[in-house]
Image: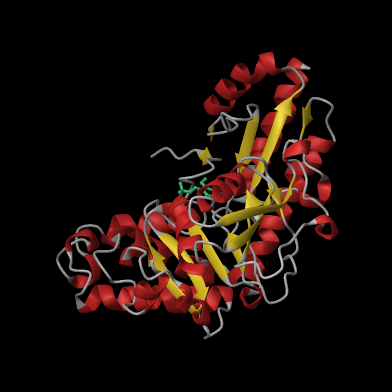
């Protein structure tokens, strides 16, 4: 068997221990004589798995009881619409802080359902920093404030949680959830597509403060109302059972690693060593202001973009996969989520040094 070091931005690497467990479980899951894909989501075994997954996620993130945990579908992109439909009336204003492409898309989609005020944007720096919170133009009585704690394409990450008083803070945590401990109590809503740190594509995790469940527009489709999921243990209709099962295995795995404090420490080290290697070289560079560099997505460019193709081909041949930057920005991007270990990051750094020596 041949496994590469996988730097994909998502769907992303899964822990090998989880893949091994899946392989072992496939023909006969839980002594059922069936795979988990073949059993009813309403059967005792699956209902138990779902409940355990929620308990493990609550433990990992220390989610307070006054929050509901929902397992939905449609990806983070659907939540771009679900957030305004659940938190605003048509004439309300929602504030958006835009620090990259995903926040921009979220604001655009929300604009179909409510008034959107872009309270701050770093578009003029080509999304390489976070505007000083003192400069944000927040709306009095905003329905909510939305931001993207980690912009997956630009590699820009908030390392502190913004203050917004009583206004519910809504965070698209797709590419940073489970990378370290967070204080869930600071948020109104957290949502994340699963396909980076949680599990396979197809599942979306939403953590929502229960008092906010009452704000949904009555005309919103029931499958787009958080409250409907909260009242049905996310079994409103047939959920993505396989993705949910894999997420449950990932949560277990993260607990075995020592939880998010331990995982976060490894992630901090991985990012620090990769940025240090980039900064120490005249050949590679990362454009993001150092205080808002992402721990999860590290974009970098080569001094000579004519070498991009060769870099990628040689990296692939060396077992380092999926390093091509997003099509909108070019260059390279190493996504170093939880399942991409320190060994992978070290292999990348060694390869980058060797390539530089040969080509600079
Ligand atoms: N938000 C962020 C921060 C993302 O990284 C992504 C996907 N890479 C999305 C939203 C869109 O997610 P999905 O494809 O699950 O809708």
Looking at the image, which residue is at 53% across and 85% down? 66
Q: 308 and 155: which one is in front? A: 155
Quarter of the picture containing the N terminus is top left
Q: Nearer the viewer, residue 196 or 87?
A: 87
Of the 4 image quadrants, the one containing the C terminus is top right
Residue 323 location, quadrant: top right
Q: Residue 117: x, y in percent?
A: 66, 54
Here the colouring is secondary structure
Q: Quadrant of residue 275?
A: top right
Q: Position of residue 250 (x, y in %)?
A: 45, 63
Task: In the rendered view, tell whether residue 326 sits above or below residue 69.
Answer: above
Q: Who is closer to the viewer here, 135 or 264?
A: 135
Q: Is residue 71 left or right of residue 58?
A: left
Q: What residue is drawn where x is 49% and y is 81%?
A: 210
In the image: residue 50, left or right of residue 10: left
**Can residue 234 be seen by looking at this rendering?**
yes
Task: Give how far across and how far down residue 65 sits, in percent.
Answer: 52, 86
Is any atom of residue 250 visible in this view? no
Residue 185 vs residue 318, the one in the foreground: 185
Q: Residue at x 51, y 62 (%)?
A: 191
Name the residue furthest top: 306
**Residue furthest toward the front?**
91
Q: Residue reaching furthest bottom?
A: 65
* Above-or-below relation of 20 to 275: below
Residue 356 in the image: state x and y as whole percent: 75, 23
Q: Residue at x 70, y 47 (%)?
A: 156
């Amino acid at each position: 068997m041949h496994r590469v070091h996988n730097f994909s931005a998502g769907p992303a690497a899964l822990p090998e221990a989880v893949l091994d467990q899946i392989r072992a479980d496939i023909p006969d899951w839980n002594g059922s004589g069936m795979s988990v894909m073949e059993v009813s989501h309403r059967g005792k075994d699956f209902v138990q798995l779902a409940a355990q997954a929620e308990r493990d996620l609550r433990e990992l993130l220390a989610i307070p009881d006054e929050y509901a945990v929902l397992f939905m579908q449609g990806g983070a992109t659907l939540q771009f619409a679900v957030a305004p439909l659940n938190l605003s009336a048509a004439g309300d204003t929602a504030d958006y802080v835009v620090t990259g492409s995903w926040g921009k898309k979220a604001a655009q989609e929300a604009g179909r359902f409510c008034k959107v005020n872009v309270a701050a944007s770093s578009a003029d720096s080509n999304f390489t920093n976070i505007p000083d919170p003192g400069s944000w133009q927040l709306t009095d009585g905003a329905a909510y404030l939305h931001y993207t704690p980690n912009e997956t394409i630009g590699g820009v990450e908030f390392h502190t949680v913004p203050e917004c008083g009583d206004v519910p803070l809504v965070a698209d945590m797709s590419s940073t959830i489970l990378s370290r401990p967070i204080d869930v109590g600071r948020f109104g809503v957290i949502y994340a597509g699963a396909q980076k740190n949680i599990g396979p594509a197809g599942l979306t995790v939403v953590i929502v403060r229960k008092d906010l469940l009452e704000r949904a527009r009555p005309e919103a489709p029931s499958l787009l109302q958080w409250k409907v999921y909260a009242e049905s243990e996310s079994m409103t209709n047939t959920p993505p059972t396989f993705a949910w099962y894999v997420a449950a295995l990932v949560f277990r795995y993260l607990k075995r690693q020592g939880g998010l404090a331990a995982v976060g420490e490894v992630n901090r080290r991985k990012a620090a060593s990769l940025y240090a290697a980039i900064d120490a070289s005249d050949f590679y560079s990362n454009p993001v202001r150092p205080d808002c560099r992402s721990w999860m997505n590290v974009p970098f460019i080569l001094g000579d973009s004519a070498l991009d193709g060769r870099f990628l081909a040689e990296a692939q041949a060396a077992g380092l996969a999926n390093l091509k930057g997003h099509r909108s920005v070019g260059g390279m991007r190493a996504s170093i989520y939880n399942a991409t270990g320190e060994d992978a990051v070290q292999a990348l750094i060694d390869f980058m040094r060797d390539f530089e020596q040969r080509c600079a």
